[in-house]
């Protein structure tokens, strides 16, 4: 089920364009990389293939049905199948952001990181907005086996890091998905800055308190 109605589709298109430009302008994704989607009652809105998130025309955003068939707009992102895979197992999620953000990608390339949860709980907002961050094994761009891996990992986490690729983050709203993606990137930057230093992550009791106070 979705909270978005047909009457709000125009507003959602504007929000995708606004967030895309903001993410691009702040260097969180570059060139024609990254994609954003929002769930609708009759399918998905997803940014078009080979498009720059900094210059998304709301009227040309792709609208696709539940099978991935194009309903209107430009040809959808070639990674739209990742969004479908994640939505299929996260029924409460209404939006997904996928970026090639520098620090998150850097963490996805580390050889000695824990693939079940890549970063320790260093800040309260990381626990509140991201939580657990598993690593999805590497697949070549466009490989449909990646969808199966994403669906498998998304059953247990709304934020994933694709190995040597970038983050895929789902949220109950587009704002929530964007904010979680931004929090992930900032925490990845902190994590890399602190390599080689002894750190003091939040305890499990502190994390549990945050999860109870601020359920996602």
Image (cartoon, helix red, strand yellow):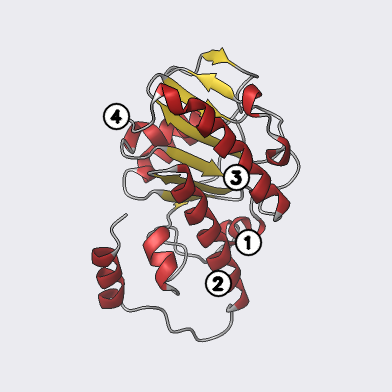
Q: Secondary structure at mark 3?
A: helix
- The reply to whether residue 144 is visible in this rendering is no
Confirm or deny contact between disc 2 and disc 3 (CB under 8 A). no
Label 2 or label 3, whichever comes before in sequence order = 3
Report which residue position mark 4 lands on.
Answer: 1
Label 3 or label 1, whichever comes before in sequence order = 3
Q: Secondary structure at mark 4?
A: loop
Q: Marks 1 and 4, Cα distance to the nearest angstrom?
A: 34 Å
Confirm or deny contact between disc 3 and disc 4 (CB under 8 A). no
On the image, which quarter does residue 143 sit in? Answer: top right
Vertical side of 152 occupied by 88: above or below: above
Label 4 or label 2, whichever comes before in sequence order = 4
What percent of the width, then of the height, locates residue 159?
Answer: 44, 51
Q: Marks 4 and 2, Cα distance to the nearest angstrom?
A: 36 Å
Q: Marks 2 and 3, Cα distance to the nearest angstrom?
A: 25 Å
Report which residue position mark 3 lands on.
Answer: 19
Report which residue position mark 1 lands on.
Answer: 103
What percent of the width, then of the height, locates residue 96?
Answer: 48, 40
Q: Nearer the viewer, mark 3 or mark 1?
A: 3
Which residue, as the protein is rendered here, is positioned at the far bottom? 198
Q: Marks 3 and 1, Cα distance to the nearest angstrom?
A: 19 Å
- 11 or 113, which lies in front? 11
Instruction: State the residue at coordinates (53%, 67%).
Output: 187
Q: Nearer the viewer, mark 2 or mark 3?
A: 3
Report which residue position mark 2 lands on.
Answer: 191
- The reply to whether residue 51 is visible in this rendering is yes
Q: Secondary structure at mark 1?
A: helix
On the image, which quarter does residue 203 sit in? Answer: bottom left
Label 1 or label 4, whichever comes before in sequence order = 4
- 61 or 11, which lies in front? 11
Q: Nearer the viewer, mark 4 or mark 2?
A: 4
Vertical side of 94 occupied by 25: above or below: below
């Amino acid at each position: 089920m979705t909270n978005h109605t047909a009457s709000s589709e125009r507003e959602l298109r504007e929000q995708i364009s606004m967030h895309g430009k903001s993410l691009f302008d702040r260097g969180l994704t570059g060139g024609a990389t990254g994609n954003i989607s929002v769930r609708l009652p009759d399918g998905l809105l997803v940014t078009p293939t080979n498009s720059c998130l900094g210059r998304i025309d709301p009227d040309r955003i792709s609208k696709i049905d539940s099978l991935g068939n194009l309903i209107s707009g430009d040809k959808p992102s070639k990674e739209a199948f990742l969004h479908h895979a994640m939505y299929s197992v996260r029924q409460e999620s209404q939006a997904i952001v996928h970026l090639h953000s520098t620090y998150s990608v850097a963490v996805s390339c580390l050889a000695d990181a824990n693939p079940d949860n890549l970063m320790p709980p260093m800040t309260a907002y990381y626990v509140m907005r991201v939580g657990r961050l598993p690593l999805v094994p590497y697949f070549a761009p466009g490989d449909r086996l990646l969808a199966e891996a994403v669906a498998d990992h998304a059953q247990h986490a709304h934020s994933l890091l694709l190995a040597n690729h970038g983050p895929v983050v789902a949220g109950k709203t587009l704002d929530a998905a964007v904010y979680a993606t931004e929090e992930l990137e900032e925490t990845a930057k902190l994590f890399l800055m602190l390599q080689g230093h002894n750190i003091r992550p939040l305890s499990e009791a502190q994390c549990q308190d945050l999860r109870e106070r601020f359920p996602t």
